[in-house]
Image (cartoon, helix red, strand yellow):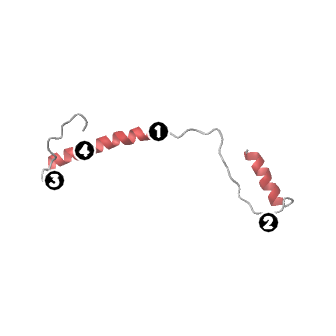
Amino acid sequence: MEGQEKSQSPSFSDPEATLKVVKQAVLELWEVINGLTSLRPPKRERFRVTIFGSARIQPDSPIYQDVKWLASRIT
């Protein structure tokens, strides 16, 4: 209600005035929502990936080698 004077708040006993306030508030909320949805996070050139493993897997294990190969492919 920018630019409007708040001389008197409407009473809930006045349904028309109450509806007018609610409609105006909803329209203003939509403006805020539309403004916020225009914000976008920055695009990253590359994704970040973390590979968790186990210290029990030995470097000569086929699984270890497969994960090592996969890591080299995605970096």
Residue highlighted by disc 3: 12
Looking at the image, residue 60 sits to the left or right of residue 2; the answer is right
* Location of the C terminus (image quadrant): top right
Q: Secondary structure at mark 4?
A: helix
Residue highlighted by disc 4: 23
In the rendered structure, which amino acid carries the disc numbered 4?
Lys
What number is the disc on residue 56? Answer: 2
User: First in sequence: mark 3 or mark 4?
Assistant: 3
User: First in sequence: mark 2 or mark 3?
Assistant: 3
* Location of the N terminus (image quadrant): top left
Residue positioned most to the bottom: 56
User: First in sequence: mark 1 or mark 2?
Assistant: 1
What residue is shown at x 71% (from left), y 55% (from top)? 51
Residue highlighted by disc 1: 39
In the rendered structure, which amino acid carries the disc numbered 2?
Arg
Of labels 1 and 4, the one closer to you: 1
In the rendered structure, which amino acid carries the disc numbered 3?
Phe
* Residue 44 drawn at (x, y percent): 61, 39
Q: CA distance from mark 2 to mark 3?
A: 69 Å
Q: CA distance from mark 2 to mark 4?
A: 64 Å
User: First in sequence: mark 2 or mark 4?
Assistant: 4
